[in-house]
Amino acid sequence: MAEKALEDLFYDMLKDIYYAERKILKALPKMARGAKNPKLKAAFEKHRDETEGQVERLQQVFEIFGKRAMGKTCPAIDGIIEEGEEVLEEFKNSPALDAGLLATAQAVEHYEIARYGTLKTWAMMLGLTEAVKLLDQTLQQEGKTDHDLTALAEASVNASALKKAA
């Protein structure tokens, strides 16, 4: 068996995040439908649109790397999305629903930030200059989304979670 190198690891993680982004695309509409806070609902819808662009950028990175765009099952994102589905079910009539959905969304963002940061660094090391730009664009976008979600949590969503169910 041939020895694995950084190129193999890069490709493996690229497939991982590609799978994750496509899975997130499917989950965001459910989260938006479940959210009660209009600003949170809008944030999920905006992130869905951004995620479509992120998938397109990933396809470009695959092309730059000379590989076919394909996903590889990502148990981490599957688990986070499953947690979000549990929140939707278990808290559907609770004032805490939006806080739970927002927390799940931030777990997704933190996962993506970790992956894109690593991929960007490895792309630099591999001399994939155009891929670095694409990955950085997504990394910046994910960081802004996380920041915006934190602001929304602090401004209203978390306080609303304290209310008693009617």
Image (cartoon, grey):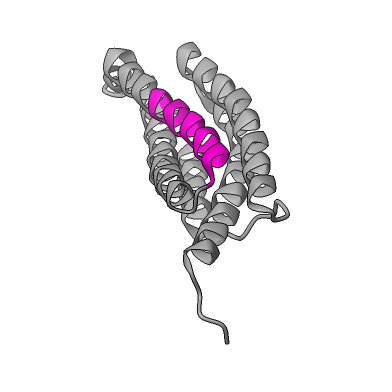
Residue 92: tell me if it is visible.
Answer: no
Q: Residue 1 location in percent, x, y?
A: 57, 87
Q: Which image quarter is the C terminus in?
A: top left
Q: Compare residues 98 and 116 and report the one nearer the observer.
A: 116
Q: Residue 126 location in percent, x, y?
A: 49, 53
- In magenta segment, residue 146: no
Number of numbered tags placed on the structure image:
0
- The dominant secondary structure in magenta is helix
**Residue plotted at (63% across, 51% down):** 65
Question: Residue 25 is drawn in which quadrant?
Answer: top right
Outermost residue on the front side: it is 127
Outermost residue on the right side: it is 68
Q: Compare residues 48 and 54 and report the one nearer the observer.
A: 54
Q: Which range of residues does the magenta coloring cover?
A: 128-145
Q: Compare residues 136 and 83 and report the one nearer the observer.
A: 136
Q: Residue 12 location in percent, x, y?
A: 55, 61
Q: Residue 160 location in percent, x, y?
A: 32, 18
Judge whether 34 appears above or below 26 on screen: above
**Residue plotted at (48% across, 48% down):** 123
Residue 49: tell me if it is visible.
Answer: yes
Judge whether 30 appears above or below 45 on screen: below
Outermost residue on the bottom side: it is 1
Judge whether 74 appears above or below 110 on screen: below
**Residue plotted at (54% across, 66% down):** 8
